[in-house]
Image: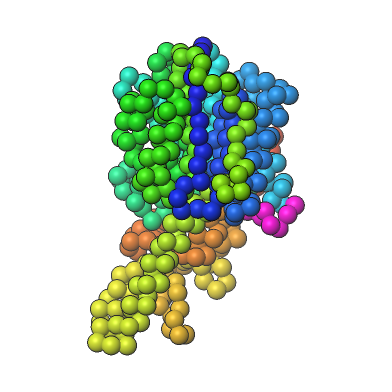
């Protein structure tokens, strides 16, 4: 089946570089959003693209299990690199892969990059975000409309490279002439809601103009992160330009790609700046006549963080200390430590994860305990117990 393809990546307006990488090599398409530090995230996403490309070229895909094996091999390569170099420790990347086999579209997915299907005016998300808030939505702890502004919305629970083995999602759909597929890093959907993305997919006439306009609108909305999009129009032949190079990555020094972990860190950094301002105000209030107002504010602030020995706990107050004054108190202690968590969650906990209430703190703590249990299970399970699954399931 003929397709028309548009693609674009952009550093955004808030970052120094671009750690997204992507692959356009029909019928294979991949978006990878790196994390783990400025250099590490770029290495992780580029490694994923390189390994998947090499695997595909040496052993072209013929089944979902084979596509999942490409992603598993990329995971092992990234993890091995992070183990070899202290500078790359803890690096990882999301990965959303699409393989078009005639009218069959096969997706393999890890992380919070996304794949969408636009058909006859309606848009649906094909992949599931591997994030803390998505898990909370599925468990009924928060509503769907709360997820976009939740304090932990940037905490990823699954990515390539964090452990030697990773669970991957596989999804199969049948595409029709007139369908429009979109792969994107979260720099797009964190800036634009689903309705605006749907509207742009509906209104733009061709794949490349759609890709361009999506990136432009994400930047106009703030451009808080790197933005990468691949748009595929099914049933149209691309005659506007010669095919793009197989692997497309920003190499311009002024347009380097930044990692997902810095996306994860960006929200906490902004919130900590706000807390610093708040804390300064609190100190001023304590020094003056506003003591009781300040005390009330501290008594109604909570976060999940780590004690001095690394045990994870819920605290009342804020993490910072000023002039030797501790502005927090331990409320509830867990049975896990920071070392029990994957690398991408440790920094969040050590900095402190803000929650709106003690009950929200317990929910966050429960999710961290589940994540620690998942990691422990993956480390102790014999490798040959794992077997690839079918469409729509976790492998």
Question: Which residue is painted at 56% across and 23% down in the image?
Answer: 99
- Left or right, 202 with respect to 238, comes to left
Answer above or below: position of 257 versus 335.
above
- Left or right, 149 with respect to 24, comes to left
The scheme the figure's colours follow is rainbow
| Picture quadrant of residue 67 | top right
- Left or right, 150 with respect to 57, comes to left
Q: Nearer the viewer, residue 282 or 5?
A: 5
Question: Which residue is painted at 59% across and 41% down in the image?
Answer: 250
Where residue 285 appears, x then y in whole percent? 29, 82
Question: Which residue is painted at 36% across and 34% down in the image?
Answer: 197
Where residue 326 appears, x then y in whole percent? 43, 80
Answer above or below: position of 333 versus 178.
below
Find the magenta span and give its range: 84-90
Answer above or below: position of 87 versus 48.
below
Question: Which residue is painted at 30% across and 44% down in the image?
Answer: 145
Where residue 79 appears, x then y in whole percent? 68, 46
Instruction: Give the mark count.
Output: 0
């Amino acid at each position: 089946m003929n397709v028309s393809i548009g693609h674009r990546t952009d550093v955004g307006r808030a970052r120094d570089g671009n750690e997204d990488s992507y692959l356009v090599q029909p019928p294979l398409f991949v978006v990878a959003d790196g994390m783990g530090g400025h250099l590490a995230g770029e290495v992780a996403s580029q490694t994923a693209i390189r390994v998947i490309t090499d695997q595909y070229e040496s052993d072209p895909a013929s089944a979902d299990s084979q596509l999942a094996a490409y992603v598993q091999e990329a995971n092992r390569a990234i993890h091995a690199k992070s183990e070899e170099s202290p500078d790359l420790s803890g690096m990882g990347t999301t990965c959303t892969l699409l393989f078009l086999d005639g009218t069959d579209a096969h997706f393999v997915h890890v992380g919070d990059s996304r794949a969408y299907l636009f058909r006859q005016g309606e848009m649906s998300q094909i992949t599931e975000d591997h994030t803390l808030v998505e898990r909370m939505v599925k468990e009924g702890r928060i509503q769907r409309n709360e997820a976009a502004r939740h304090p932990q919305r940037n905490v990823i629970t699954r990515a390539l490279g964090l452990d030697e083995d990773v669970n991957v999602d596989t999804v199969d759909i049948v595409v029709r002439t007139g369908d429009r597929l979109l792969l994107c890093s979260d720099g797009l959907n964190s800036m634009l809601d689903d309705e605006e993305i749907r509207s742009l997919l509906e209104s733009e006439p061709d794949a490349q103009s759609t890709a361009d306009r999506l990136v432009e609108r994400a930047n106009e909305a703030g451009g808080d992160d790197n933005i990468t999009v691949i748009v595929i129009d099914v049933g149209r032949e691309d005659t506007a330009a010669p095919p793009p190079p197989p692997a497309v990555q920003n190499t311009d020094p002024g347009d380097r790609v930044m990692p997902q972990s810095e996306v994860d860190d960006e929200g906490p950094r902004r919130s900590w700046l706000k807390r610093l301002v708040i804390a300064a105000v609190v100190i001023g209030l304590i020094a003056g006549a506003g003591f009781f107002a300040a005390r009330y504010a501290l008594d109604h602030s909570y976060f999940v963080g780590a004690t001095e020995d690394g045990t994870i706990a819920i605290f009342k107050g804020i993490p910072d200390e000023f002039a030797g004054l501790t502005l927090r108190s331990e409320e509830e202690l867990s049975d896990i430590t920071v070392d029990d968590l994957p690398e991408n969650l440790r920094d969040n906990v050590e900095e402190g994860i803000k929650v709106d209430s003690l009950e929200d703190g317990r929910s966050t703590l429960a999710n961290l305990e589940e994540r620690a249990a998942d990691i422990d299970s993956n480390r102790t399970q014999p490798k040959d117990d794992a077997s690839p699954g079918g469409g729509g399931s976790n492998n």
